[in-house]
């Protein structure tokens, strides 16, 4: 549950230099899977999530890696509507979790109060108040610390079924409940999303698991971003620890096999991937949280 798969074949990569963009073309096939549950309290404190990442490009860039990605700081996350606001949600799970690059940007009660529960002259903005972005910054490294490869896909989720609410016993606020909530000053959700789901408020107390709820976390896509390989003189097969570090050419107890092309793809200008999956509909008949 919570494993998100995305793919794209023959995608055109983007160049950070206009001259390079006019001279070169790089196309890639990509398949990626991240454990990204957006229905429970787990992600509030757990920053370790399994990632499988496969990419193969016409310029020779290629990697096939499976790791335990470390996304941000254990025990906390950043508010999706204000990345400067770090929210300590509890004790890290597991307690010995290391810190890593990137961040888990998750909506909290302040985000929904500001962007979802609004006055009579406003419209609720779910894109601002109820959106997640799990932003990975990961490297594969040799035992001597040398970087062999790096990549930083961002896994985006629209309309998740939960947000962080520290007034709740488990810290979990249910997005569907916002359709019924009215603040003392009259602020409430003002959107066709809730009107349609609740039949103009005539369907009361819908559960977050209801197939009619629009907050199922099925609206998702991935920003592929950068893919760097610095393995010109190295073997194509490396064995690392579960975090992608301590890489060696030979397997060792507990090691994971990784494949990295024997190239250096630094060409003096930036190449990055597009957004994939935005045009796919994962919210078909019967789809509902938890997922």
Image (tube, grey):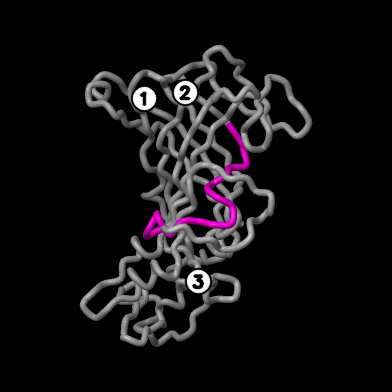
Left or right: 286 with respect to 280?
right
Q: Secondary structure at mark 3?
A: loop
Is the C-beta separation of discs 2 and 1 under 8 Å? Answer: yes
Badge 3: residue crowd in 10 Å (few <14, some 14–19, many ≥20): some
Q: Quadrant of residue 237?
A: top right
Which of 219/189 is in front? 189
Element marked by disc 2: loop
Give the camera-side residue of 4 and 244: 244
- Residue projecting furthest to the left: 121
Give the answer, above or below, for where 153 lies relative to 17: below
Instruction: Classify 10 Å Cα crowding around label 2: few (below 14), some (14-19), many (20 and above).
Output: many
Where residue 289 appears, as percent x and y from the top left, is 54, 66
| Residue hosting label 2 | 61
Side (left or right) of 247 relative to 129? right
The residue singled out by tag 1 in the image is 26
Does residue 282 appear in the picture of this structure?
no
Q: Residue at x 26, y 72 (%)?
A: 123
The label number, if any, that marks residue 8 in the structure image = none
Highlighted range, magenta: 65-84
Q: Is residue 81 above or below residue 139?
A: below
Residue under numbered circle 3: 165
In front: label 2 or label 3: 3
**Marks 2/1: CA–CA distance:** 10 Å
| Residue 117 in picture, x, y percent from top left | 34, 75
Real-space Cα distance between discs 2 and 3?
A: 43 Å
* Residue at point 53%, 37% (across, down): 138
Q: What residue is shown at x 54% (from left), y 16% (from top)?
A: 262
Q: CA distance from mark 1 to mark 3?
A: 44 Å
- Tell me: residue 163, above or below residue 56: below
């Amino acid at each position: 549950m919570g494993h998100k798969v995305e793919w794209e074949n023959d995608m055109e990569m983007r160049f950070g230099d206009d001259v390079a963009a006019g001279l070169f073309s790089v196309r890639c096939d990509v398949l990626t899977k991240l454990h990204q549950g957006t229905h429970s309290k787990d992600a509030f404190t757990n920053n370790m999530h399994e990632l499988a990442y496969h990419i193969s490009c016409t310029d020779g860039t290629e990697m096939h890696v499976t790791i335990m990605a470390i996304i941000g700081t254990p025990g906390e996350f950043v508010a999706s509507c204000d990345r400067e606001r770090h929210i300590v949600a509890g004790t890290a799970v597991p307690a010995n979790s290391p810190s890593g690059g990137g961040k888990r940007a998750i909506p909290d009660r302040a985000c929904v109060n500001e962007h979802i529960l609004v006055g009579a002259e406003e419209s609720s903005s779910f894109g601002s108040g109820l959106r997640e972005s799990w932003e990975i910054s990961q490297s594969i490294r040799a035992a001597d610390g040398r970087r062999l490869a790096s990549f930083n896909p961002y896994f985006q989720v629209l309309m998740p079924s939960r947000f962080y609410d520290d007034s709740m016993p488990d810290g979990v606020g249910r997005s569907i409940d916002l359709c019924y909530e009215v603040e003392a000053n009259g602020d409430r959700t003002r959107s066709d999303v809730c009107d349609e789901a609740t039949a103009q408020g005539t369907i009361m107390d819908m559960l977050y698991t209801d197939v009619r709820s629009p907050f199922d976390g099925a609206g998702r896509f991935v920003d592929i971003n950068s893919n760097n390989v610095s393995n010109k003189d190295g073997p194509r097969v490396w064995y690392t620890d579960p975090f992608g570090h301590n890489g060696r050419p030979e397997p060792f107890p507990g090691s994971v096999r990784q494949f990295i092309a024997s190239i250096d793809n630094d060409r003096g200008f930036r190449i990055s991937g597009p957004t994939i999956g935005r045009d796919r509909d994962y919210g078909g008949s019967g789809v509902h949280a938890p997922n």
